[in-house]
Image (tube, rainbow, N blue to C red):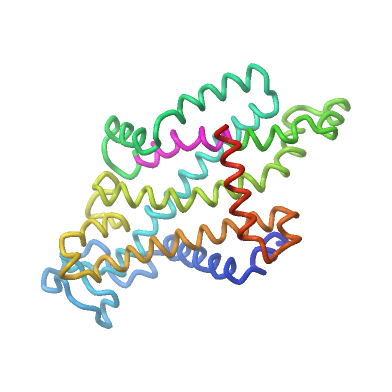
């Protein structure tokens, strides 16, 4: 609650948090919020303008754009969040092991990470899609396979800063188990880095899944997804540009809100940044860049 209070003290962060919360709630309860079936076709309403029955109008098949936008939250945001949690969990476990034990364990795990990170993320994702086939599930699997190495390397750098501290040595001297030491002493100090990395990566993963769906490699018709809605409206982007406005604005707003919330979260978790609230965003951005540089090094 104290953390939430610090985050919400920032008006921009509070507004961003409200946007994310409303988006998640709308996605979970899409059945109740969507005014129509997102797959229901009405050819007589093809390219119909906004009306009281269809607040955002209808697409090329007469489907309700608002309903498809709401249902599109599930693959565009909620399922991406599941893939993010999986990637962070794998990366955190391996990062803690490498940073705590170091030596040969660290060397072996980091060389595996080097191999995974030596290939561009988009190229590897396309390779996984080429092997497993197109579809949302395969893209999420590709994200989990590729992102964990990046999280593991950066979290390992954070853990190594504290693994040789005096209080860690004292905990070992009094007979504390490795698992207990990592859970009680290293997880709390590494949590700010993990939280900021996860929140900042969330926005980029939303952009990635929307980009792949726009290219026709993600979720397939007739299911609703923001990137695919942009792809469907591409053919009439000059004659009916408003069809691209709703999904495009949804992506921009959610990703921007997640980035602003990430900066505020780092400021709330870092006592040094909390001491200078007027410089939170600039300091958070600089700190994130430095952390990423250390992880790649």
* Residue 185 coordinates in the image, percent (x, y): 77, 38
Position of residue 208 in the picture relative to residue 170 (left or right): left
Residue 58 place in picture, x, y as percent: 21, 71
| Farthest-out residue, bottom | 52
Provide the major secondary structure of the magenta segment: helix
State the residue in front, 30 or 19. 19
Q: Residue furthest top?
A: 104
Q: Viewed as shown, does residue 240 lie left or right of 165?
A: left
- Please tell me which residue is depicted at 58% across the width and 36% down the height of the picture: 295
Give above or below for 181 relative to 212.
above
The magenta-colored residue range is: 139-153
Judge by depth and name the residue closer to the eye, 204 or 148: 204
What is the x, y in percent for residue 161? 72, 35
The number of discs equals 0
Q: Is residue 81 left or right of residue 184?
A: left
Q: Where 24 falls versus 134 (above or below)?
A: below
Image spot of residue 14 (x, y percent):
59, 69
């Amino acid at each position: 609650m104290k953390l939430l209070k610090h985050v919400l003290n920032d008006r921009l962060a509070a507004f961003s948090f409200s946007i994310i919360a409303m988006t998640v709630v709308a996605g979970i309860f899409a059945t109740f919020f969507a005014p129509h079936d997102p797959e229901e076709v009405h050819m007589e309403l093809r390219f119909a303008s906004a009306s009281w029955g269809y607040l955002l109008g209808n697409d090329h098949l007469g489907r309700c754009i608002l309903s498809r936008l709401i249902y599109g939250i599930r693959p565009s945001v909620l399922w991406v969040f599941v893939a993010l949690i999986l990637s962070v969990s794998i990366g955190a476990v391996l990062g803690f092991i490498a940073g705590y034990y170091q030596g040969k364990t660290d060397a072996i795990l980091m060389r595996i990470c080097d191999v995974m990170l030596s290939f561009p993320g988009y190229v590897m994702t396309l390779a996984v899609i080429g092997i497993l086939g197109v579809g949302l599930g395969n893209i999420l699997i590709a994200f989990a396979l590729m992102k964990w190495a990046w999280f593991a390397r950066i979290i390992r750098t954070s853990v190594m800063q504290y693994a040789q501290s005096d209080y860690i040595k004292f905990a070992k001297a009094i007979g504390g188990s490795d698992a207990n030491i990592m859970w009680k002493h290293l997880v709390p100090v590494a949590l700010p880095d993990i939280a900021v990395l996860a929140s900042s990566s969330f926005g980029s993963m939303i952009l990635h899944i929307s980009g792949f769906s726009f290219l026709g490699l993600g979720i397939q018709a007739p299911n609703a997804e923001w990137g695919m809605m942009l792809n469907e409206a591409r053919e009439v982007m000059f004659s009916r540009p408003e069809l691209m406005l709703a999904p495009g604005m949804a992506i921009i707003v959610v990703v921007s809100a997640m980035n602003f919330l990430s900066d505020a979260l780092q400021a709330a978790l870092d006592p040094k940044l909390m001491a200078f609230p007027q410089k939170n965003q600039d300091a958070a951005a600089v700190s994130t860049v430095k952390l990423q540089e250390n992880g790649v090094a």
